[in-house]
Image: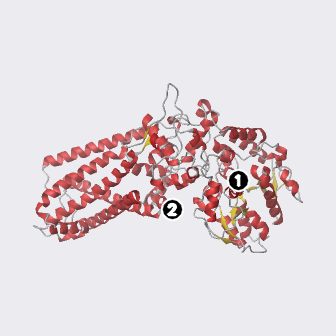
Amino acid sequence: MFETREIFRNFSLWMEVIFYLVAFASIGVFLYGFWRRYQKYRRGRPVERFNQLGRRFIKALGIMAKNSTVFKRDPYAGAAHWMIFWGFVVLFIGTCIVALDHDFLEPVFQYRLLKGTFYRWYSVFLDAAGVLFIAGLLMMIFRRGAMKLPQLDYQRVDRSAGAYDRKGYALDDKIFLWLLLLVAISGFFIEGFRIAVDRQTADLSFEKWSPAGWALAGLSDALGLTASGNALHLSLWWLHGIMVVCFVAYIPFSKAMHMLADYANLMFKDEMAARRLPGVTEEQMKTGMGYRKIEDFTWKELLDFDACTKCGRCHVACPARASGAPLSPRDLILDLRSYADSTIGVKELFTQNLSNGPKSAGKEILVAGDVIRQDTLWSCTTCMACVEACPVGIEHLTSIVQLRRTLVDKGKMEDSLQDVLANIGDYGNSFGQPERARAKWTQGLDFQIKDVRKEQAEFLWFVGDFASFDARMQEMTRKVARIFQHIGLDFGLMYEGEKNAGNDVRRIGEEGLFEMLVEDNLAAMSKAKFRQIVTTDPHSFNTLKNEYPEFGSTYPVFHYTGLLCKLLDQGKLTFSKKLSHYKVTYHDPCYLGRYNGETEAPRKLLRALGVEFHEMKRCGANSFCCGAGGGRIWMDDSKLEKRPSEQRIEEALEIEGVNLFIVACPKDYAMYSDAVKTSGNEGKIAVKDIIELVQEAL
C-alpha cells in the first residue's frame, strides 16, 4: 500500500452522489445569502474606496495575517484568534487540495497529488493546524464562558432589561464556536479510526506523520473500539460532513459572515475616517442634510454594520457609555444592522428582538430619532475611541455625525447647543463676543504681537475660541505668547480676522456653518503674510491639518507641543532648571493623540523638564476622553452618573503620590479643573498645562 489515504472510504456510489448533492446545495444557499448581502450593499450610496486597490489589498492581507488589530490591547484574544485564523486557513487549503486531487487531477490526468512525500508533509501540517485550531477555539470558549468580560456583556445602556432580547446573539456566538470545534474534533477521530482499522492489515507506519490521528488510533485500540472502527468511521464521516455543509450554508446568515466581511472592511477602510469627515453631496442638498433612510448610508457603511463581530471593544472604550449616557457604539452599529437587514438586506438567523422598535404609524421612519434615539446620538463626544479600538475597520463616527446632521437640519437639539451655533454664526465664536474682542487677551502683555494681515511672520498663531475668550484660559494664553516671544519665535495673529476653526461645529452636524467658517478663515489667511500655522488647541489643530486642505489650504500645521519639541531638538529651546520636585501624569487630548498620533512630543518635553513622570493606565492612542468634544462641552451633563473628566481624575489619583495632572488643551484645562473640584479632590492634585511647566523651567 503506497503512502496515501482513500477519500470516500467504504462509500458506495449512491453515498458519494448524496454527499455531492448536499454539498452543492449548501454552496447554493451560501451563494444566495452572499448575493443578498451584495445586493444590500449596492443599495447604499456610492463612495470612492477603490483607489490604490493593490495597496489596500496587501495592507488588509498583512493585518489579517498578523491579526495585529485583534492583538491590540488584548493579547489573549489576539493569540486565540491568530490560532483559529491560521488553523482554519491551513485546514481550508487542505480541503481544497483534497478536492483538487480527487475531483480533478485523478479523474482527468490519472495523477495523485496526495501520496508519498507530499502526503506525509500534508498530513503533519494539517494535524498541527487542527490542534492549533482546536486550542484557539477552546481559549475563546473559555474567554466567553468563564472570564465574564464587560465587553462581552450584551446588556444595553439605553433600554430597560424587558425592552429587548439578545439571546439570539449569545446563541449565535455559541453555535459559531462549538460548530467549528465539533467539526475539528470529529475530523481527528475520523482519522484515528481509519488508521486504527487499516493498520491491522497493512503497514501504515507512514501515518505517524499524522501524529494526532496516530495517537487517537492508539486510544481506539486501548478502549477496544477498533473492532467497530469501520462503523464508527463511517458514522463520524457523515456527521462531520453534515456539520461542514451546514456551516457553509450558515455563513451568510450568521456571525460567521465576519470571516468575509472583515477582510473587505479592512481593505476599504478610510485611513482618515473621523479625522476628516465627508462633506454634503448635491443630492443631500436637495433632499435634506444627513441620513434619513437606510439607503442614505454608503455601501461601506452598510458593510461596516455586517463586519461587526460584537467584540465590545468600542463598547468598553466609549466615555459616554462609561459615564452612564445612553450610547454604546457597538449597540448603535448592531441596531443599524438589524434595521438595514429588515428593510433591504438578508435577515440573520439569530438576532436581537426589540419590544419598541421603529414603527411607521403612517409617517416616514427616520433613522435619526426613530431607529437611533436622539439622546443616543447627542451623547457622543466624538473622541474617536470606538474607531481606534475597532479591530475590523468600522467607522462609527462618520455614521453618527451624518445622523446628527439630520437632527440639526430638523432643529432637534438642546437649546444651549442651538444658542452656541447661533453665536458662532453671528460672531464667529462660541462665546457670543464681538469679533473685535477676540484679541482682548493681549492687553496684559508688555509687547505687541504682529498682525499677519499687515506684516510678515513665519507662524500664524491660530488661538481658538477657548484660549481667546474663556476667563480661565486668558492668562494661560498670555503665558504662551510670552514664551513664544522669549524663544524668538516669529509669530503673529489674525486678530478679529480669526473665527472658530469649526472642528466641533462639523462634528455636531452643522456642515453648512462649518463650511462658512472655513471659507471665512481661508479668505482671511489668503490676505495674511505667514508660512506655517501653530495652535494651542488640538480641536483647531485637527481640522486645520486634516480638513482645511480639502478646501484649498496648504499650510503646515503644528500643535504647540510639537513645535516646542522641534525647537528643543534644534537647540533653540533650553531650560535653565529641572522640575524634579513634581510628580506628574499626562492626559493625551483626543484630538492630539488619538486623532493625530502626536503622543511623543508632550512626553519628550516632560522628560526635558526633568519631572517625575508616570503614565495612567489609559494613555497615548488609548487615552480616555474629558467629555468636551463633539459639542458636549455646550450641552447639559447633569444627568450623567459620573462625568468622564471626574473618572479621569480618579484614574490619575491611582498613581501614588502624583501631584500634577498635565494637559495640552484649553478645553481639557477647563474640564479637569472643574472635575478636581466636583470630585472633591482639591488639594490632592492640581491641573496644569505643559506651557506652565515650560515657563517655570525657563
The vertical placement of 76 against 354, above or below, is below
Return the residue at label 2: 73
Neighbourhood count class around disc 1 (C-alpha, 10 Å): few under 14, some 14–19, many 20 upward: many
Q: CA distance from mark 1 to mark 2?
A: 28 Å
Q: Foreground residue, 542 or 471? A: 471
What's the colour scheme? secondary structure
Callout 1 amino acid? Lys
Residue 265 image offset from top left, x and y in percent = 47, 49
Q: Is residue 464 visible?
A: no
Residue 612 image offset from top left, x and y in percent = 67, 72
**Residue drawn at point x = 65 percent, y = 66 percent:** 585
Q: Foreground residue, 303 or 396? A: 396
Q: Furthest residue to the top? A: 362
Residue 610 image offset from top left, x and y in percent = 71, 73
User: Residue 667: which numbered mark, if any?
Assistant: 1
Q: Is residue 682 visible?
A: yes
Q: Quadrant of residue 373?
A: top right
Residue 194 image offset from top left, x and y in percent = 17, 62
Q: Secondary structure at mark 1?
A: helix
